[in-house]
Amino acid sequence: MPLLSRLTVVFKFVFIFLIYLIIFFSLKIMYKDLKKGKGTSKKQSKSYEFALEVLKVSKDNATLKVGSIIPLRDDFFIGRDEKNSLQLNDNFVSKKHVKIYWDKDCFVIKDLNSTNGVIINDEIIDSEMYLEVDDKIQIGANLFKVVG
C-alpha cells in the first residue's frame, strides 16, 4: 500500500509539471507571434492609416456629416449605388464614380468613367492619381480631405 500511495503522489507532481510545461510553451509561442506581428499583414495595417475627412456634403446626404472620418480600405468604391463602400446621394455623382485602392505604399484614386469627373486639389483627373495626405477630393457637391 505505501508503494501505491507514493506512486499516486509522484503522478500528481508529474501531471502538474506537464500542465505547467504546456502553459509555458503556449505563452512563449504567443509572445513570439505578438513580437513578430504575426496575423496582420503589412498591407492591411498600412491601409488603415489613411482616411477621408468630410469637409462639405450635398444637401441630399442626410447620413453623412461634416467632420466625419471614413477609414479607407482596399477597393473602396464611392458612388450613388448602395453597393458602394460610400454611397453619395447626389445627382452629380455616378452609380460607380470612383475607386480608391492600395498600390504598394499608398492609395490611388481612379475615375470610373463618371459623367462629371473627379476633382483633386482643384484639378479634374481623367484616369488615376496617387493620393497624399491633405489632398482634397471633390465628387459632385461633396468635398473630402485625405488624412493620415
Image: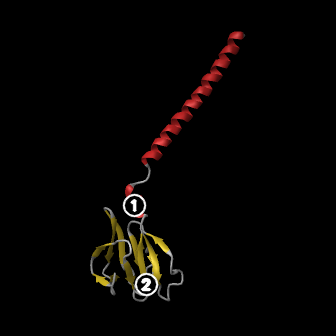
Residue 60 point in image, percent of width and height: 50, 88
Which image quarter is the N terminus in? top right
Please indicate whether residue 110 sits to the left or right of residue 60 in the image: left
Residue 33 point in image, percent of width and height: 46, 44
**Is residue 144 in sight in this rendering?**
yes
**Is residue 82 in sight in this rendering?**
no
Q: Quadrant of residue 126?
A: bottom left
Please indicate whether residue 19 sits to the left or right of residue 33 in the image: right
Residue 93 point in image, percent of width and height: 40, 85
Residue 122 point in image, percent of width and height: 33, 85
Residue holding disc 1? 46
Residue holding disc 2? 142
Residue pushed farthest right?
Answer: 1
Please indicate whether residue 97 sits to the left or right of residue 27 in the image: left
Which image quarter is the C terminus in? bottom left
Circle 2 packing at 10 Å, graded few (<14), some (14-19), many (20+), is many
Number of residue marks: 2
Q: Mark 2 falls on what kind of element? A: strand
Q: Is residue 25 above or below residue 72?
A: above
Q: Nearer the viewer, residue 15 or 119?
A: 119
- The span from disc 1 to disc 2 (Cα, nearest Å) is 26 Å
Amino acid type indicated by mark 1: Lys
Asked if the residue at tag 2 contacts the one at tag 1, i.e. Cβ–Cβ closer than 8 Å, the answer is no
Q: What's the residue at 30%, 84% (across, down)?
A: 124
Counting residues from the start of the chain, the first of labels 1 and 2 encountered is 1
Q: Is residue 69 above or below residue 6?
A: below
Q: What's the residue at 37%, 58% (across, down)?
A: 43
Q: Quadrant of residue 119?
A: bottom left
